[in-house]
């Protein structure tokens, strides 16, 4: 007969705590062939590191910002300012690359032009 120590007790107590925390996320019960009721925890979906909806909203917001800048400044002035950025440091050149007029920005600027 094995002697139960306090370490064994704390180990079992930790396992019960983990199972309880997992069951708080949801569980199902099944009856096995021998009549024993078994509780199984529901697995959560693996979460993405970056939520796709949030990333899409951020990109759309950036394109709307660029379109607003393009429609308020005008295409000539906007391109002049992007050209100035291209003459700067590497970070400014990266900004100039990102701020170039693309088809999406041009399309959105057409909608925003009457508003500015």
Image (spheres, rainbow, N blue to C red):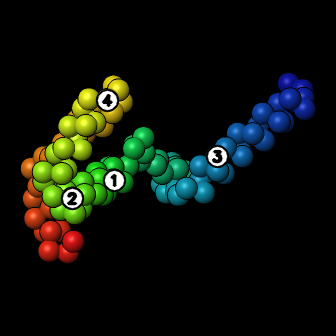
* Of labels 1 and 4, the one closer to you: 4
Alpha carbons under labels 1 and 3: distance apart: 38 Å
Alpha carbons under labels 2 and 1: distance apart: 23 Å
Residue at x 52%, y 49% (from the top left corner): 40
**Residue 10: image location, x then y, percent:** 83, 36
The reply, left or right, for residue 48 in relation to residue 66 is right
Residue at x 15%, y 58% (from the top left corner): 74
Residue at x 55%, y 56% (from the top left corner): 25
> Is residue 31 in view?
no
Q: Quadrant of the C terminus?
A: bottom left
Sort mark 2 into few (<14), some (14-19) or many (20+) by Cα contacts within 10 Å: some
Element marked by disc 1: helix
Where on the picture, by quarter, is residue 54? bottom left
**Residue 93: image location, x then y, percent:** 28, 30
Sort mark 1 into few (<14), some (14-19) or many (20+) by Cα contacts within 10 Å: few
The reply, left or right, for residue 108 in relation to residue 62 is left
Q: Are marks 1 and 3 in contact (CB under 8 Å)?
A: no
Tell me the residue that label 4 is attached to: 88
Alpha carbons under labels 3 and 4: distance apart: 58 Å
Q: Which numbered disc, 1 or 3, marks the residue that appears first in the sequence?
A: 3
């Amino acid at each position: 007969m094995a002697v139960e120590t306090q370490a064994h007790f704390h180990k079992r107590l930790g396992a019960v705590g983990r199972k309880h925390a997992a069951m708080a996320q949801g569980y199902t019960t099944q009856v096995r062939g021998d009549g024993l009721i078994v509780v199984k925890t529901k697995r959560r979906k693996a979460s993405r590191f970056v939520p796709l909806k949030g990333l899409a909203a951020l990109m759309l917001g950036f394109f709307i910002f660029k379109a607003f800048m393009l429609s308020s400044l005008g295409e000539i002035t906007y391109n002049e300012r992007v050209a100035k950025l291209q003459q700067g440091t590497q970070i400014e050149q990266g900004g100039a690359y990102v701020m170039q007029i693309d088809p999406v920005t041009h399309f959105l600027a057409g909608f925003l032009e009457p508003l500015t």
